[in-house]
């Protein structure tokens, strides 16, 4: 730990300085490619080669699927690591070792270890933080690490690992400024995580996406297991489903997370676990059942409080917004919620708004905490043009409190549009993630 005049430096102050340093890399924006991260990882001893992993890519459901896999393996008695993004309130949420955030002290030390080695002219925020994650995961020596892709797949910094299993969840149009236009182009980037001979578990449902994934896998002899063809989940009630594959049948699984799409994410996770069992992991049906019943992922149709009900959902793709709309119709039939909406400008804004505006009683537009945020006034004007009442407020917190003041106890408030909306709203409702 650094010292100042013979006394330990305040840990929180030093941690805050470390996070400020990492965010200074935002000036480079998003630079896809593996050259920078490969050089950086080699300089710190290639930690990505020192742990076993599962790699999770896709447009929708990456975080939930990763959480299900992590929970099942943990409840089976194995030590795990989980790397996800973005975080909600504290950067350390991204790197969880044995179910806990890495410590502030570890964050500081790992950042300082890498500081002399990075390219000051090119290294991005995600490359630096991925190097930190891989360094800390390797040091922890988990039995399995679950690694979520940041953006795309083929050129994402996480694509330097050699996983036991690759996962591609459902694919929709997103980040087209970076990944190319249309489902086929986006699927090509996602399919870049497929490795020769490494099994691929996928929930991609669109024809073009499936064609790309199957063709890529065939070219490099990677076995593919598709949801709906090789394994399936069948809903039996709003929160229960039956799982079935060629070798495994588990009826009556109960989910803690709400939404029909979570049954699919859970099924993907179970199929991944089947592959892990083939590789020698001892994972029981009991562990699978328990993981399904306890796994929660913040910001996925998450009920934060009652009277009025407050729901936060990170829906930020057209498919995600349609799923949110469907879940609201099932849970609150005939009711029009009050919306707190913030969207990043590189999203398919018009489609997102046209999906959700017709079911909203009123919308308050805010800016998610990102330099890619769409101006709230521009979002407000688009919503008004569709005939839905809307106004804009400077901050997420102020917008939330404004809706809370207007809402009656039987109303529903929904915050959505970006993963960067989740943290401030959860904090306003008194949720602590550590």
Image (cartoon, grey):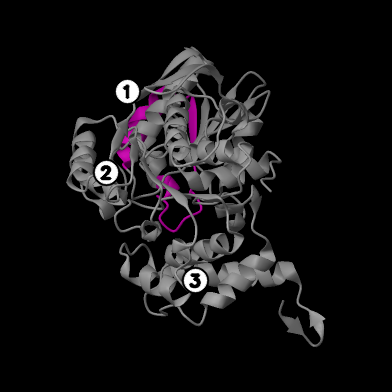
Are the residues tagged 2 and 1 within 8 Å (C-beta)?
Answer: no
> Badge 2 is on which residue?
222
> Badge 3 is on which residue?
24
- Image x and y of residue 292, in percent: 56, 28
Secondary structure under tag 3 reads helix
Q: Residues within 10 Å of mark 2 (few under 14, many from 20)?
A: some
Q: Is residue 21 left or right of residue 374?
A: right
> Badge 1 is on which residue?
228
Q: Which is more foreground, mark 2 or mark 3?
A: 2
* Viewer-nearest residue: 68 or 179: 68
* Residue at the (68%, 67%) spot, across then down: 105
Image-quadrant location for residue 433: top right
**Mark earlier in primary sequence (2, 1):** 2
Question: Which residue in the rendered view is the most extreme toward the front?
Answer: 280
**Mark earlier in primary sequence (2, 3):** 3
Q: Disc 3 versus disc 1: distance between alpha carbons?
A: 44 Å
Image-quadrant location for residue 43: bottom left
């Amino acid at each position: 730990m650094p010292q100042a005049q013979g006394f330990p430096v305040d840990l929180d102050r030093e941690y805050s300085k470390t996070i400020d340093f990492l965010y200074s890399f935002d000036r480079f924006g998003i630079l896809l490619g593996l050259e920078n991260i490969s050089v950086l990882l080699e300089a710190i001893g290639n930690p990505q080669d020192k742990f076993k992993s599962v790699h999770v890519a896709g447009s929708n459901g990456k975080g939930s699927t990763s959480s299900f896999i992590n929970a099942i393996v943990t409840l089976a008695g194995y030590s795990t690591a989980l790397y996800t993004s973005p975080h909600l309130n504290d950067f350390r949420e991204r790197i969880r070792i044995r179910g806990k955030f890495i410590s502030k002290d570890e964050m500081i030390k790992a950042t300082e270890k890498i500081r002399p080695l990075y390219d000051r002219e090119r290294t991005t925020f995600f490359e630096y933080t991925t190097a930190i994650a891989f360094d800390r995961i390797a040091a922890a020596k988990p039995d399995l690490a679950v690694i979520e892709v940041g953006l795309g797949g083929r050129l994402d910094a996480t694509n330097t690992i050699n996983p036991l299993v690759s996962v591609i969840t459902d694919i929709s149009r997103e980040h087209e400024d970076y990944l190319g236009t249309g489902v086929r182009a986006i699927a090509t980037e996602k399919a870049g995580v497929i490795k020769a001979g490494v099994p691929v578990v996928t929930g991609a449902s669109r024809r073009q996406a499936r064609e790309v994934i199957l063709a890529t896998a065939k070219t490099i002899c990677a076995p593919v297991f598709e949801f709906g063809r090789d394994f399936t989940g069948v809903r039996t009630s709003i929160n229960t489903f039956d799982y079935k594959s060629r070798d495994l049948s588990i009826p009556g699984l109960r989910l803690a997370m709400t939404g029909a799409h979570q049954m699919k994410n859970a099924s993907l996770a179970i199929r991944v676990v089947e592959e892990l069992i083939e590789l020698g992991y001892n994972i029981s049906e009991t562990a699978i059942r328990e993981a399904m019943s306890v796994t929660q992922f913040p910001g996925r149709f998450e009920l934060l409080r009652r009277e009025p009900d407050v729901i936060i959902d990170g829906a930020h793709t057209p498919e995600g917004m349609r799923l949110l709309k469907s879940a609201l119709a099932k849970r609150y039939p005939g009711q029009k919620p009050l919306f707190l909406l913030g969207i990043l400008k590189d999203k398919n804004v018009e489609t997102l708004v046209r999906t959700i505006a017709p079911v909203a009683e009123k919308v308050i537009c805010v800016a998610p905490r990102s330099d890619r945020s769409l101006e709230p006034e521009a979002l407000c004007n688009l919503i008004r043009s569709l005939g839905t009442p809307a106004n804009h407020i400077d901050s997420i917190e102020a917008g939330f409190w404004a809706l809370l003041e207007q809402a009656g106890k039987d109303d529903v408030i929904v915050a959505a549009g970006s993963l960067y909306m989740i943290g401030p709203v959860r904090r306003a409702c008194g949720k602590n993630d550590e």
